[in-house]
Image (cartoon, rainbow, N blue to C red):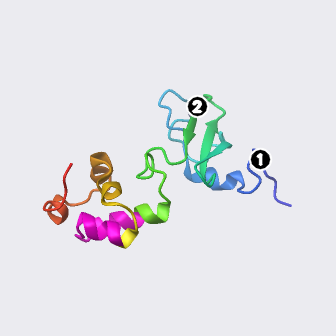
């Protein structure tokens, strides 16, 4: 039988090998699969966002930290769909319609747009910050 660690029996910590501690002062900073992380809490309406705990430094962080999903509660599938629409040149309104969100959600954050590397030329006529 597989050995499980941590508090998240529904998702074994084996899935945490793609995460690393984001604390630059930590001895395990940016070290993947170091065995220092565990799930300490679940967040979001459906409890689908994991908060991770680093045993080395005691830092807690969202599994979404440092990703396009960091400041949104939207499902990952919706965020990916929005980014794809914008990258392919859809207008804000078209993207909102396709993704079934409000135009305000699509406009949501300049930093989000920047981090997604959405070409300015594809949205310049529709983007209002
Ligand atoms: Zn750490």
Is residue 46 rendered to the left or right of residue 97?
right
Task: Look at the image and say whether residue 84 sits in the magenta stretch.
Answer: yes
Which residue sits at x=73%, y=49%? 8
Residue found 47% across the figure and 65% down from its top: 77
Q: Residue furthest right?
A: 1
> Measuring 56% from the left and 53% from the top, which residue is drawn there?
18
Q: Quadrant of the N terminus?
A: bottom right
Residue 88, image quadrant: bottom left
Span shown in magenta: 80-97
Question: In which of the image's four quarters is ligand 1 placed?
Answer: top right
Residue holding disc 1 = 5
- Left or right relative to 72: residue 51: right
Q: Quadrant of residue 93?
A: bottom left
How many marks the image carries: the answer is 2
Could you say which is closer to the camera, residue 82 or residue 10? 82
Disc 1 residue: CB within 8 Å of ligand 1? no
Q: Secondary structure at mark 2?
A: loop
Q: Residue 31: x and y, percent?
A: 54, 42
Is the CB atom of the residue marked by disc 2 within 8 angstroms of ligand 1's nearest atom? yes
Which residue is denoted by mark 2 in the rendering? 59
- Which of these two is toward me, 114 or 1? 114
Q: Disc 1 to disc 2, how far (Cα)? A: 18 Å
The image position of residue 127, as x and y in percent, is: 19, 57
Q: Is residue 116 above or below residue 23?
A: below
User: Dot 2, how many residues are within 10 Å of its Cα: few (below 14), some (14-19), or many (20+)?
Assistant: some
Q: Earlier in the sequence, mark 1 or mark 2?
A: 1
SS at mark 1?
loop
């Amino acid at each position: 039988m597989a050995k499980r660690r941590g508090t998240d029996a529904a998702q074994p910590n084996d899935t945490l090998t793609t995460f690393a501690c984001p604390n630059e002062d930590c001895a395990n900073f940016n070290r993947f699969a170091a065995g220092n992380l565990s799930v300490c809490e679940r967040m979001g309406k459906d409890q689908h966002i994991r908060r991770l705990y680093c045993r080395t430094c005691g830092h807690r962080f969202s599994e979404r930290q440092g990703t396009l999903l960091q400041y949104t509660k939207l499902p990952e599938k919706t965020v990916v769909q929005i980014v794809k629409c914008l990258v392919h040149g859809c207008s804000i309104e078209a993207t909102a319609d396709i993704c079934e969100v409000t135009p305000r959600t699509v406009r949501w954050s300049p930093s989000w747009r920047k981090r997604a590397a959405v070409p300015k030329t594809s949205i310049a006529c529709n983007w209002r910050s």
